[in-house]
Image (cartoon, helix red, strand yellow):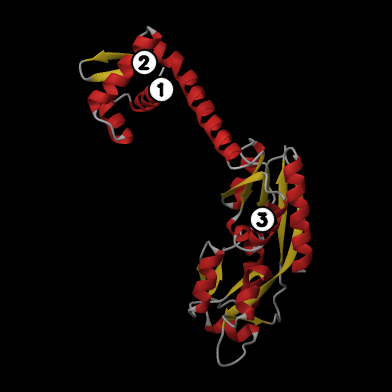
Amino acid sequence: MNIKWIRTFIVAAKYENFRKTSEELFLTQPAITKHIKRLEAYLNVQLFERNGKIIFLSPAGYRFLPYAKEIILKYEKGLDEFEAWKQGYKRKLTIATAPQIASSILPRTLRGFMDQNPNIEVFINVLKSYEIGKDISVGRADLGLTRIKPIQTNIDCHIVHEEPVILVGPTDEKKYDEKTILQKYKLITHNHPDYWDSLLNDIKRNYPSVRTMKVNQIEITKRFIEQRLGISYLPYTMVKEEIKMNKLLEISPDKIDLPTSFTYVLTKVETEEARTFIGFLKEEVKRLQ
């Protein structure tokens, strides 16, 4: 039985249309027909029923479909594991992480972890913070790094890092106070998944005339601030390099109580690989403080 026949069958079962199947697989329709016929001959059963040009899964096709998907899944997993073995990896660690963490504290931690654990293959999935808990819950990732607490109750969650949130604006010829800069620039909001609702209420209570602009990514927010499109409240580690390089300016607080940003580690089953990585992360966090 050829693995190509099974792939063709799965796609054909999805569309119940050989033309759409050929378009997705970049094969001719005669090639699609040949794959299906050869698979049917091998299994000695009819997988599709035909009514003129219309095709649909037969009862046998419905029965075989989950087995076909399982065969492909095991085949691909086996190839991945064999490729990892060829590269010298014996274990693996899948990390689901929020973009803010992936672009700040994660790279240095990963470098140290991989240098000391060359036999562990690391996979990184960058997801929205609210999606990470689900990935851990269903076992798609071994470890999650997020800025918000998950809603799932079957996973462990603890704080691994907390840091101040600061007001930052564009560098200019003069220093600004909180009131002046909130009057001059638009406030860029909702680039962090946790603290904006309560923070914005506090800002509007003290500065009712403030103008806002929603931007849902921190990296874009920083570029906007550099181009004098606005100001924002951001976690310190996300902007410390730009402040050091004089690309952004920290503004001292006055009436606004600055929030705190938390980084959470999520696990369902703490594997040895996850435990080792968490240890590296905690050491890296200490150096940041």
The relative height of residue 218 versus residue 274 in the rendered view (above or below) is below
Q: Amino acid at mark 2?
A: Leu
Measured as percent of width and height from the top left, residue 108 is found at 67, 61
Distance of mark 3 from mark 2, alpha carbons? 45 Å
Q: Amino acid at mark 3?
A: Leu
Q: Tag on residue 39?
A: 2
Q: Residue at x 28, y 35 (%)?
A: 23
Q: Quadrant of residue 286?
A: bottom right
Type of amino acid at the residue the image marks with label 1:
Ile
Count of number-bearing discs = 3
User: Label 1, label 2: how many angstroms apart (C-alpha)?
Assistant: 7 Å
Report if residue 151 is visible in the image. no
Mark 1 lies on a secondary structure that is: helix
Q: What residue does disc 1 label? A: 6
The answer to whether 167 is drawn above or below residue 10 in the figure is below
Residue toward you, 49 or 251: 49
